[in-house]
Image (tube, rainbow, N blue to C red):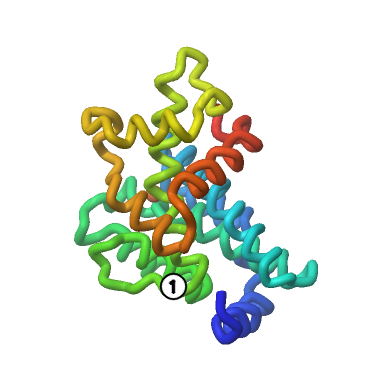
């Protein structure tokens, strides 16, 4: 997050923190999404994006209040990125219908911009760190979940970077996950692909219980 974007975020975050927190995001997601796997996807993306948020907060050396606001933005953005998908899965509607609803409800611009940006076809550029983190974690979190689910124990603890890279080359495996998006996501975030896969894996391993892996 550059200084200007950071300042803008802090201003909007101050007014909105209480009403637009993680609990509210979870409630909205649960209201719109019955599918357990889609809810788990939102949680898995939240875990990875939040880990990116912690790294960014450390990099920016934020004090505790600023840090908390940044982490809330990252967590809520990730939780809500697909919240309209069950009701509006078409390219015409997702994520546009959801973002309109988020605007109506008063969710912050930074969150809505990142959600629009995670859909390549929206044409909305990914500029801020949270925009890039969401895009870099969305498809990857889905892919790492798929890698865990084919293990006999279905445990993310058993998944390793080398195995993930091997499975990325297997076109028949988890066909719904766009490999190019995973590669592009890490590049846009400015991190090495293996390092990013390892980073997201570690984040998911630490909070595996929350996503049943
Ligand atoms: Fe997603």
Judge left or right: residue 147 versus residue 8. Answer: left
Task: Give how far across and how far down residue 53 sits, in percent.
Answer: 61, 60
**Which residue extends farthest right?**
64
**Which residue extends farthest top?**
152
Name the image quarter holding residue 61: bottom right
Task: Give how far across and how far down residue 126 sits, in percent.
Answer: 39, 70
Q: Is residue 92 or residue 212 the one in the foreground?
A: 212
The response on whether ligand 1 sits within 8 Å of label 1 is no
160 versus 115 height, above or below: above
In the rendered image, the quadrant that contains the C terminus is: top right
- SS label for mark 1: helix
Name the image quarter holding residue 94: bottom left
189 versus 200 height, above or below: below
Residue drawn at x 50%, y 27% is: 159
132 versus 8 height, above or below: above
Q: Is residue 70 or residue 196 the one in the foreground?
A: 196
Res. 36 visible in picture: no
Task: Give how far across and how far down residue 181 sits, in percent.
Answer: 31, 53
In the rendered image, the quadrant that contains the N terminus is: bottom right
Judge left or right: residue 59 versus residue 125. Answer: right
Dot 1 surroundings within 10 Å: few (below 14), some, or many (20 or more)? few
- Which residue is label 1 attached to? 104
């Amino acid at each position: 997050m550059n200084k200007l974007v950071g300042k803008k975020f802090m201003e909007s975050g101050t007014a909105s923190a209480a009403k637009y927190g993680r609990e509210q995001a979870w409630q909205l997601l649960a209201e719109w999404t019955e599918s357990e796997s889609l809810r788990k996807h939102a949680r898995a993306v939240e875990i990875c994006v939040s880990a990116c948020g912690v790294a960014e907060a450390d990099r920016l050396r934020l004090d505790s209040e600023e840090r908390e606001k940044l982490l809330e933005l990252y967590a809520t953005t990730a939780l809500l990125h697909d919240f309209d998908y069950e009701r509006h899965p078409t390219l015409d509607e997702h994520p546009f219908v959801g973002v309109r609803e988020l605007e109506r409800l008063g969710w912050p611009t930074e969150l809505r911009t990142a959600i629009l940006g995670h859909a390549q076809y929206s044409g909305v550029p990914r500029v801020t760190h949270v925009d890039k983190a969401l895009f870099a974690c969305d498809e990857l979190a889905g892919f790492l979940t798929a890698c865990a689910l084919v293990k006999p124990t279905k445990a993310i603890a058993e998944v390793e970077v080398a195995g993930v890279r091997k499975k990325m080359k297997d076109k028949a495996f988890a066909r719904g996950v766009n490999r190019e998006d995973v590669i592009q996501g890490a590049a846009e975030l400015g991190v090495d692909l293996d390092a990013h896969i390892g980073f997201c894996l570690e984040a998911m391993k630490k909070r595996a219980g929350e996503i049943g892996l």
